[in-house]
Every structure is written in C-alpha cells, then in structure tokens.
Amino acid sequence: MKRILFMFLVVTAIALAPARAQHEHPATPQAAPGGAKAEFLEQVAEYEKKFTALAEAVPAEKYTSHPSEGVRTVGEVYAHVAAGNYMFLHILGVAAPAGVDPKAISGLGGDKAKTVQALKDSFVFMRKSVEGMDDASLESPADFFGTKTTRRGVFFHITGHLGEHLGQAIANARTNGVVPPWTAERMKKQAEKKDAKPQP
C-alpha cells in the first residue's frame, strides 16, 4: 500500500512540474510577425479594399458632383488618392511606372472607369514597391516636403493621407445616397441574424 501511495505521489509531482514551471517562468509573448513593413502593408490592404469598393459603388453620374463650392468633386477625391500613392512612393525613391503620369491621373475625376482603374493600379504598385523594400532601409533619412523624417516616417504620412480621404469619400458617398459596401454588408448580416432568431 505504501509503495502504491509513493508511486502516486511521484507521478503527480512529475505531472505538475511543467505547469508549476510555466507559472513561475511565464512564456515570453511572441513578437508580432513582419515588422514595420508588414504592419504598413496590412493597413494599406484595408484602405485599398475600402477605397475600391466605395469608388465602384458610387454611380458614374455622381463623380462630377461637388459636395460644396471650392472642394474636390466626388471623383476627384479618388483620383487625388491614386495620384498621391505615386507621389508618396516618389518620396521613398520609387519612380512611377513608364507611361504613368500622376498629374494626369489627378484630372481623371470625371471619368469613373478611368478613375477606378487608376486607383486600383496605384494600390497594386504601392504594395509591390513596398514589398520589395528591406526593413532595415526604412530607417534611412527622407525629406517630406522640407520636413526631415525617415522612410518609415513616410509610411505614417501615407496612412494619414489615406485615412483623411477615406473619411471624405465616405461622407461624399452618403451625401449621394450610397451606403459604404462594408457597412451595408454588416447591416445585412445583422438583419439576417435577427430574422433567424426563434420567435417566442
């Protein structure tokens, strides 16, 4: 009987040892994968998805509408974002592809098909260009319109620019009776979930 009790205590001690060790020495949290470049690309992908969906959802006849006097038209906002993507890459030392003129893109706002295509192309080029960058190179100095920063710092300016104009584009869309597609999808799922609930 004593031998059985002894063996039980030994087995229990062995089984509890890993848990006790983990409690005394918690595992080190895993670092987020990728670094600054990967985090930036993740945000850009989200902006790309929303800008593209919204630009496609707005009717072509609304692209020339002015929310108010002295501001960009609905379509000009998307064209400005597309041109801006190339402009920011230029600051990072990446030239626009042959045949692509950012200034010309800025004037496409009245043509929905051309504006949407330019927007898509600009995001694709931005992603591919940044994917080819080395994380270590992001600490290199950069000049942002006279302000000294780093290439990584330019990333913050890019996401700030995209965030500002996405908000503007959303407001323009709603003014013209267009609900952002991702919001419409969420509302649809909520309604379906509500309808699926059993009635008392």
Image: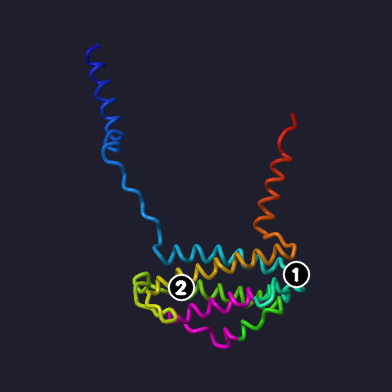
Residue type, numbered disc 1: Pro
Pick the front one: 185 or 144: 144
Residue for point 70% across, 59% down: 179
Q: Can you give x and y, in whole percent of width and height, for residue 40 in the image?
A: 46, 65
Specify the quadrant that holds the C terminus.
top right
Q: Secondary structure at mark 1?
A: loop
Query: Which residue is located at x 62 percent, y 82 percent?
Result: 105
Residue designated by label 2: 130
Please name the residue that numbered disc 1 is placed on.
59
**Which secondary structure lies at badge 2?**
helix
Front tag of 2 and 1:
1
Which one is nearer the viewer's eye here, 148 or 119?
148
Can you give x and y, in whole percent of width and height, for residue 101 in the image?
Answer: 58, 86
Residue span colored magenta: 76-103
**What amino acid is found at the position of numbered circle 2 in the picture?**
Val
Q: Residues within 10 Å of mark 2 (few under 14, many from 20)?
A: some
Q: Residue 197: x, y in percent?
A: 71, 36
Q: Residue furthest bottom?
A: 99
Left or right of 14 on screen, residue 38: right
Residue 10 placement (x, y as % from top left): 24, 24
Left or right position of 151 against 179: left
Main structural element of the magenta stretch: helix, strand or loop?
A: helix
